[in-house]
Amino acid sequence: MSEVEHVLAVHDELGEGPVWHADEGALYWVDIERHLVHRYHPASGAHAVFDVTVPITVLRPRQAGGFVTGTSKGFAFWDPATRALEFIAHPEADRPHNRFNDGAVDRHGRFWAGTMNQHDAAAPDGCLYRLDADGSVHAVASGFSVYNGTAWSPDGRTMYFTDTFRRMILACDYDAAAGTIANQRPFAQVPEAEGYPDGHTVDSEGYVWSTHWGGWRVTRYSPTGQKERQIELPVENVTCCAFGGEHLDELYITTARSGLHEAARARQPLAGDLFRVRVGVAGLPTYKFAG
C-alpha cells in the first residue's frame, strides 16, 4: 500500500460524496456548503467546478445521462452539460430543517438516500428513502441522527449504512429483488477518541472502508466488523471515500474545513482537499440510476 497522496487543493468547506464515473474516467464529488460539484479527470489532470446554486449532497450517474441527486430540497436530476437541475420529489417538504445527506444506487438501479436535521445533527430525525426508476419514493427506515454511507456487500445480500452521532455503522439483510431491508444490526462501533463515522464504501473482498469526521483517518473493517487497518490523514474531518481509477484500486478521499476554528484551519492547511491512496485491493463498480 502506498502513502496518502494529496491530489487537489480545493479547500472544500464540506467536501463529500465522491463517485467514480467509469464512462468518463472521472471522479465527481460535492462541496455541500458552497453548492459546488467537482469533476476531476486523473488521466489529464483536468478539474472542473460547477456552481449548482443549491446544496447537492450526493450524486450518482443516470442511465439516461447526467446524475440523480439528493439535495436540500429533495431528489433531483442534474445535467453537467446543461447545468440544469430538475427537482422530481421532496419527501420531507414538511420538515424544512431536514436535507438529504448520503446515498448510493444498488445493482438494480434504485437510488437509496438518507436525511438529517440541519439544525440539530444529533436529533434522530433522519430517514432512509428508496427512489425507484418510475419516480416513486418509498420510506424504508427512520430514527437516524445523521444518515451516512450506503453500500452493499459483493454478493448484494448485506447493506451497510451509518448513524453518525451514535458512532455506529449498521448492517442489514438486503433483498435485492424486492428492494427491502431486514434485521438491522450493529456492524461496528467507533470509539469516541476516533471521531464519528462518516461516509463509507465496500471493496471487492467485502471489507468496509469508513471515514472519520473528527478522527483524522479511514478505517477498513472486515466483513465481521473487525478493524483490519487504519489510514491516517493530515486533516481532522475526513468525510467520504470511493474507489476509482482504471482498475478501481485507488481510494479517493474527501475532507472538510467546516467546523474548524481559525487556529485549527491554520494548523491543517490541507483541510478540505482531495486525497488518494493506492490500497492494493479493488472496489466495486458504480451502478447507474435506472430512471
Image (tube, helix red, strand yellow):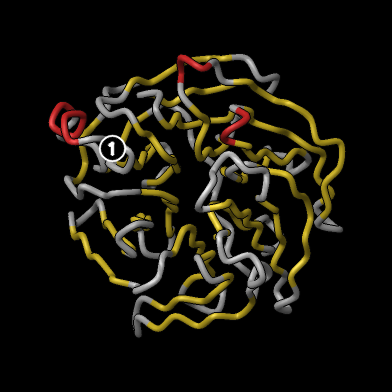
Tell me the quarter of the picture where residue 22 sits.
bottom left
Q: Please state if 154 lies on the left or on the right of 278 as rendered.
A: right
Q: Residue at x 36, y 46 (%)?
A: 245
**Residue at 19%, 60% in the rendered image:** 46
Give the secondary structure at mark 1. strand
**Quadrant position of residue 182:** top right
Residue 280 vertical position relative to residue 131 in the rendered view, above or below = above
Q: Quadrant of the C terminus?
A: bottom right
Q: Front-most of 3 and 166?
A: 166
The residue sitting at 45% across, 76% down in the picture is 78
**Is residue 37 shown left or right of residue 176?**
left
In the rendered image, the vertical position of residue 196 relative to residue 15, given as above or below: above
| Residue 142 position in % (x across, y down) | 75, 49
Q: Looking at the rendering, which quadrant does residue 23 occupy?
A: bottom left
Residue 77: percent from left, percent from top: 51, 76
In this image, 3 relative to 128: left or right? left
Which three-letter amino acid code belongs to the residue tagged 1? Phe
In this rendered view, identify the residue nearer to me: 183 or 90: 90
Q: Nearer the viewer, residue 56 or 61?
A: 56
Label 1 CA crowd tier, 10 Å (few <14, some 14–19, many 20+): many
Where is residue 110 shown, x and y percent of the image?
A: 69, 63
| Residue 78 in the figure: left or right of residue 34 | right
Residue at 35% of width from left, 73% of height from top? Answer: 52
Q: Nearer the viewer, residue 131 or 57?
A: 57
Residue 233 position in % (x across, y down): 30, 25
Q: Is residue 251 above or below residue 54?
A: above
Residue occupied by mark 1 = 275
